[in-house]
């Protein structure tokens, strides 16, 4: 369930809620999240096509996936990359959401390994890439910072 929410439904609902409950400020934050998400999508798709790392269940027949993957390759975890980058950007705009976003993001990351869809290194690398991407986007958007 958590993994499927990480497909995008949770993040789309968050962006809609920000606009609904915080008007123009929410729209600005949602636009920042959406732009970061588009870059994350392009980046992780290119990395998957470049590395072509087989998923754990494809490399070892003893591993059975609990759900069908959305694409063929394993590295990096797109769910984790998006969850981390969205969380970092969202918390720069709304730090009070940490109590929801941090556990959700951690759950998405862990679920990808538990479900047999990713190696731990896929998730760790995606965490680093997501943090770097979000940090770059925060650097590029004036007036949004953690400090």
Image: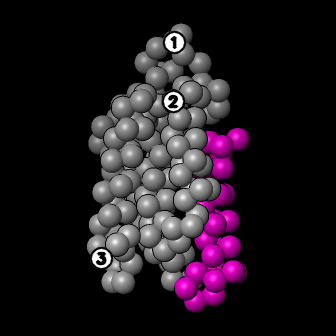
Give the class, few, some or many, for how many residues have Cα within 10 Å of label 1's Cα (few <14, many ≥20): few
- Residue bearing the label numbered 1: 61
Find residue 103 and report its horizontal and vertical position in percent.
57, 47
Main SS of the magenta part reads: helix
**Would residue 108 be seen by someone viewing this image from the given angle?**
no
Q: Is residue 123 left or right of residue 70?
A: left
Res. 86 mark: none
Instruction: State which quarter of the image contains the N terminus.
Output: top right
Using the numbered discs, state the Cα–Cα distance from disc 2 to disc 3 in whole angstroms: 32 Å
- Residue bearing the label numbered 2: 113
**Would residue 93 be seen by someone viewing this image from the given angle?**
yes
Task: Find out whether the residues at labels 2 and 1 contact each other: C-beta distance under 8 Å.
Answer: no
SS of the residue under disc 3: helix
Give the class, few, some or many, for how many residues have Cα within 10 Å of label 3's Cα (few <14, many ≥20): few
Picture mark count: 3
Answer whether residue 24 is magenta in the image: yes
The region drawn magenta spans 1-26
Residue shown at 49% from the left, 59% from the top: 87
Using the numbered discs, state the Cα–Cα distance from disc 2 to disc 1 in whole angstroms: 16 Å
Answer whether residue 50 is magenta in the image: no
Foreground residue, 35 or 124?
Answer: 124
Tell me which corner region of the image, top left, top right, bottom left or bottom right, holds residue 96.
bottom right
Lower position in the chain sequence, tag 1 or tag 3: 1
Lower position in the chain sequence, tag 2 or tag 1: 1
Q: Please state which of the two labelled residues, at mark 1 or mark 3, is closer to the viewer.
A: 3
SS of the residue under disc 1: loop
């Amino acid at each position: 369930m958590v993994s499927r929410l990480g497909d995008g439904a949770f993040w789309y609902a968050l962006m809609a809620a920000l606009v609904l409950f915080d008007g123009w400020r929410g729209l600005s934050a949602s636009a920042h999240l959406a732009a970061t998400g588009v870059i994350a999508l392009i980046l992780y798709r290119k990395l998957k096509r470049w590395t072509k790392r087989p998923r754990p269940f494809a490399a070892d027949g003893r591993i059975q996936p609990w759900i069908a993957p959305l694409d063929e390759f394993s590295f990096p975890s797109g769910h984790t990359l998006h969850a981390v980058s969205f969380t970092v950007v969202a918390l720069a705009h709304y730090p009070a959401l940490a109590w929801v976003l941090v556990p959700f993001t951690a759950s998405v990351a862990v679920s990808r390994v538990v479900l047999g869809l990713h190696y731990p290194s896929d998730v760790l690398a995606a965490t680093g890439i997501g943090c770097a991407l979000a940090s770059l986007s925060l650097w590029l958007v004036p007036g949004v910072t953690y400090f």
